[in-house]
Image (spheres, helix red, strand yellow):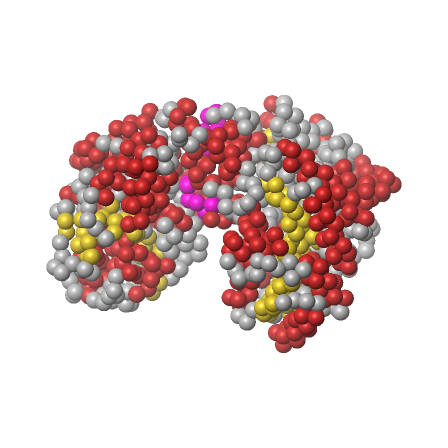
């Protein structure tokens, strides 16, 4: 029996309406309306459950105005799982009102079916030059014409070749000390192949053999948090089957959102499926963020060359509050000789991306991003490292809008660079914006 | 709300600062209290977010002409139902007026707009070695305007007093739309009635506060924190009375009962003995040299009156660990029961043991769980009722128990509310404390300033 919307009553009444979420909610910080803070969302959900309110357009809009950043969840004195409540409301909306035609197409046709996604992305690469122009400093691209997204929006181009096409299924190393499977996620596969390459190179350098299962899918989070549970379940089961088949010591992720999905959310999603819930638990126990794995490898600090550069780090929401990865990336960055690590203020505040949130609420999402960019800029760093491709794209967009020159990269890329210098393959020079 | 009123309001604040949809207005039917607005008759007509005094004045003038109720609101963290919508009203949110106008180091004052977050003011003044002491639990998100309107307190009340002790001047808008200034920038000021003190704690019933002048004090040099564990709660209560009686003034003196202790230990694992009857968390502050001496004296009193375990924090981190227990208190008890009602009865400090006794008797009588946590140093006990609001039968018993707690408090010479306010939650009890004539005088003040009863009607005096 699948959990009914009404059954969330138990969770909504735990909200004592103290208002502590006002202190941390990035959307509320911009909008200030009571309906835009966690307490308001919970009250609205309660209103629908108790039939004070209906699933109106207004309600649907309020539910869409959540970044799912979990800041309220960790700050809530009563421990109300606001993100789960919003997700339950979106599920109710999707079931009773249906998804929008665009979301329907993307979720049910594209993301679910790997070959459609692959073909679409390949075709997309050929045509993207017609509609996008190159961004400043050769980074990213800007729309040439209106696409329903802001013309100032810096997007990253699709890669020449998807990540999975760049490597054999098994990347062997001599005398491997460990064997892991890598879940790349969509953005690394199609856009940030550099991140994927860095993950592979760093792991190789540390004697870790990497399996890249070709049949892996999108993790399903974009589908699930928009309420389409049916599609999300199909995607989860497919990934579980693919990864449990591999004989590996760990499943490595380089994205907090995908990681949280594989580690914890599949179990919740599949709780009514007695066979797959056990499989999901097994997969979950094997999942490790890239930085978590690296710091556990003896000798990862050996062979690093010096990078005379100032670095700051942004905590992706699902990495820091989901997978609870906070110290590991900092430990890696600080261990690189020459690097000056400068902590920004509020490093764990959401960058405003929120996945599809930034496409549907672009203005708002850029306002939230402005605060993040300001904190980053104040550090005077030349490199921003982070652990999530969506944050990477959104922050690069923000820096571009503000005319700030700075490199944005995954922690893995910074580490890869240090190893390269260590091998004498390259010397590094950075321009400060 | 009539469309032409909304149109006029929109012209005053701008259309982006005004909300009229059902979903938006639904979110002003509550605050942090257990009071709920009746959706059928108490859904606001509009919520407006003015940006300056002039806009507030225009809004009030319009409301007064049209006799529309106005509910002033800050962060909506009110715990007595004083900021929820009533009738087809205007919700007047002051959050956009959020500037710290000045921090005057020479005169030790700060001037702020009402939407400034209390905790932000504190960190700003502390950066230059000054101190604004009032510390309600909500300080990280509640506003100065709300704190002044409710006369908020907090743990530091025992040594430093409450909001009222720091407000020396106000700019307010009267229901007529006229703007007046009360008090000023001086410590001494006896020109006319003390309107500043009257408006502080007036719960949005007399005026809308648009500017606040507070006095600041030098930031204490150092702090020292200790925890004492007692087998019986009565021993802890006697210890509190004794500490106060010998003239020691800690800056915090917090009491946690056994229900809290057990829940905190299960939840946060801070090493509290779960069989203990009560724990006192004590903090002293001041010159670094005298702190050890003060702590030593308090330690002696605790031992003499039966403390079985005493921990004095040696480092900042250890002190933080002790406070972690106190701060996790609320989260800890909320795991077991979904509905938590925090009461606010306050008694003279010597009556704390008697008050604790009465509360426990009432809990037994109505067969409900009441945990006690309190700013014991100033007699402000927060009886915390752990219940489930969906259990209607229990809810009825809870209501009776709350009524009895109020009566017991006043019998012990105490106050219905120490720092939460009367609001809508306690308005029907007000005469127990003020008496009929006392209430009549308050009514007359209200009528003189707000003859049309547009400002927060129902708050304090009932419907």
Q: Is residue B341 magenta?
A: no
Q: Position of residue A416 (x, y in %)?
A: 22, 58
Q: Where residue B80 sits in the image (x, y, percent)? A: 67, 42
Question: Is B183 in front, or is B233?
Answer: B233
For the residue pair B277 and A37, the one nearer the viewer reads as B277
Q: Looking at the figure, which quarter contains the C terminus of chain A?
A: bottom left
**Is residue A393 visible in the rendered structure shown here?**
no
Q: Nearer the viewer, residue A271 or A19?
A: A271
Give the position of the N terminus of chain A as an image quadrant.
top left
Magenta stretch secondary structure, dominant: helix
Kindly tell me whether residue A71 is visible in this rendering: yes
Horizontal side of residue B50 vs A163, given as left or right:
right
**Residue lying at 33% horizontally and 52% vertically, measured from the top left:** A386
Span of residues in magenta: A56-73
Please, is residue B274 above or below residue B462 in the view?
below
Displayed quadrant of residue B394? top right
Task: State the image coordinates of residue A49 (x, y, percent, origin top left).
Answer: 51, 29
Q: Position of residue B415 (x, y in %)?
A: 77, 49
Rendered residue at 61%/60% (across/down): B276
Drawn side of residue B460 relative to residue B56, left or right: right
Name which residue lies at 55% across and 65% down: B319
Point 47% across, 45% down: residue:
A73
Vertical side of A22 occupied by B304: above or below: below
- Nearer the observer, B268 or A305: B268
């Amino acid at each position: 029996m699948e959990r009914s919307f009404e059954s969330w009553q138990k969770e909504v009444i735990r909200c004592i309406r103290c208002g502590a979420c006002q202190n941390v909610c990035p959307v509320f910080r911009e909008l200030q309306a009571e309906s835009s803070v966690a307490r308001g969302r919970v009250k609205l959900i309660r209103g629908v459950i108790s039939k004070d309110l209906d699933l109106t357009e207004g309600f649907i809009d309020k539910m869409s105005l959540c970044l799912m950043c979990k800041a309220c969840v960790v700050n809530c004195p009563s421990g109300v799982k606001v993100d789960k409540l919003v997700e339950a409301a979106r599920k109710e909306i999707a079931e009773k009102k249906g998804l929008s035609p665009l979301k329907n197409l993307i979720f049910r046709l594209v993301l679910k079916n790997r070959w459609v996604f692959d073909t679409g992305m390949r075709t997309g690469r050929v045509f993207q030059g017609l509609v996008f122009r190159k961004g400043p400093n050769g980074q990213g691209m800007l729309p040439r014409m209106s696409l329903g997204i802001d013309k100032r929006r810096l997007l990253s181009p699709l890669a020449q070749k998807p990540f999975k096409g760049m490597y054999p299924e098994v990347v062997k190393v001599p005398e491997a000390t460990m064997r892991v499977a890598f879940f790349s996620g969509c953005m690394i596969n199609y856009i940030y192949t550099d991140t994927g390459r860095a993950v592979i190179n760093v792991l190789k350098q540390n004697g870790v053999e990497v399996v890249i299962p070709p049949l892996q899918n999108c993790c399903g989070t974009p589908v699930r948090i928009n309420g389409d549970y049916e599609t999300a379940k199909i995607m989860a089961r497919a990934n579980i089957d693919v990864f449990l088949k591999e004989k590996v010591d760990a499943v490595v992720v380089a994205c907090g959102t995908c990681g949280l999905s594989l580690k914890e959310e599949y179990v919740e999603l599949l709780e009514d499926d007695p066979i797959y819930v056990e499989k999901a638990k097994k997969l979950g126990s094997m999942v490790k963020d890239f930085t978590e794995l690296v710091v556990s490898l003896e000798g990862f600090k050996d062979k690093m060359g010096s990078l005379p550069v100032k670095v700051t780090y942004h905590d992706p929401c699902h990495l820091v509050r989901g997978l609870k990865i906070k110290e590991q990336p900092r430990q890696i960055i600080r261990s690189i000789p020459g690097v000056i690590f400068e902590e920004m203020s509020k490093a764990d505040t959401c960058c405003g991306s929120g996945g599809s949130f930034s496409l549907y609420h672009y203005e708002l999402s850029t306002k939230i991003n402005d605060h993040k960019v300001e904190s980053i800029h104040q550090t005077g760093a030349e490199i921003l490292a982070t652990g999530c491709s969506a944050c990477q794209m959104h922050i690069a967009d923000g820096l571009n809008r503000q005319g700030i020159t700075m490199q944005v990269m995954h922690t893995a890329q910074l580490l890869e660079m240090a190893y390269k210098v260590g091998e004498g393959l390259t010397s590094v020079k950075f321009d400060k914006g | 709300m009539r469309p032409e009123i909304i149109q006029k309001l929109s012209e005053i604040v701008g259309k982006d600062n005004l909300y009229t949809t059902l979903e938006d207005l639904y979110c002003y039917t509550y605050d942090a209290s257990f009071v709920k607005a009746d959706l059928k008759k108490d859904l606001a007509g509009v919520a407006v977010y003015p940006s300056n005094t002039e806009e507030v004045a225009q809004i009030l003038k319009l409301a007064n002409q049209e006799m529309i109720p106005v509910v002033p609101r800050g962060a909506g963290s009110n715990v007595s139902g004083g900021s929820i919508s009533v009738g087809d009203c205007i919700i007047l949110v002051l959050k956009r007026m959020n500037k710290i106008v000045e921090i005057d180091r020479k005169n030790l004052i700060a001037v702020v707009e009402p939407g400034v977050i209390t905790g932000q003011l504190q960190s700003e003044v502390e950066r230059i070695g000054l101190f604004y002491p009032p510390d309600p639990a909500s300080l990280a998100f509640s506003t100065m305007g709300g704190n002044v309107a409710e006369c908020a307190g907090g743990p530091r009340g025992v040594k430093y007093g409450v909001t009222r002790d720091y407000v020396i001047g106000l700019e307010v808008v009267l229901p007529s739309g006229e703007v007046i200034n009360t008090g000023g920038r001086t410590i001494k000021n006896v020109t006319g009635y003390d309107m500043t003190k009257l408006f502080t704690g007036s719960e949005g019933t007399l005026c809308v506060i648009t500017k606040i002048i507070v006095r600041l004090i030098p930031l204490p040099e150092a702090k020292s924190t200790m925890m004492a564990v007692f087998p019986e709660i009565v021993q802890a209560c006697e210890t509190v009375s004794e500490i106060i009686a010998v003239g020691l003034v800690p800056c915090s003196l917090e009491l946690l009962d056994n229900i809290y202790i057990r829940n905190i230990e299960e939840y946060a694992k801070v090493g509290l003995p779960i069989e203990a009857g009560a724990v006192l968390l004590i903090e002293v502050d001041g010159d670094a040299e005298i702190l050890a001496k003060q702590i030593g004296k308090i330690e002696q009193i605790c031992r003499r009156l039966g403390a079985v375990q005493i921990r004095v924090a040696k480092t900042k981190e250890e002190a933080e660990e002790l406070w972690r227990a106190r701060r996790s208190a609320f989260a800890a008890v909320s795991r077991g029961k979904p509905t938590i009602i925090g009461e606010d009865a306050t008694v003279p400090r010597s009556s704390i043991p008697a008050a604790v006794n009465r509360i426990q008797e009432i809990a037994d009588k109505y067969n409900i769980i009441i945990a006690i946590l309190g700013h014991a140093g100033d007699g402000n006990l927060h009886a915390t009722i752990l219940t489930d609001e969906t259990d209607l039968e229990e809810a009825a018993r809870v209501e009776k128990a709350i009524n009895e707690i109020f009566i017991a408090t006043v019998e012990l010479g105490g106050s219905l509310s120490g720092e939460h306010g009367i609001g809508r939650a306690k308005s029907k009890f007000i005469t127990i404390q003020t008496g009929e004539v006392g209430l009549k005088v308050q009514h007359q003040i209200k009528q003189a300033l707000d003859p049309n009863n547009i400002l927060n009607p129902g708050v304090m005096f009932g419907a």
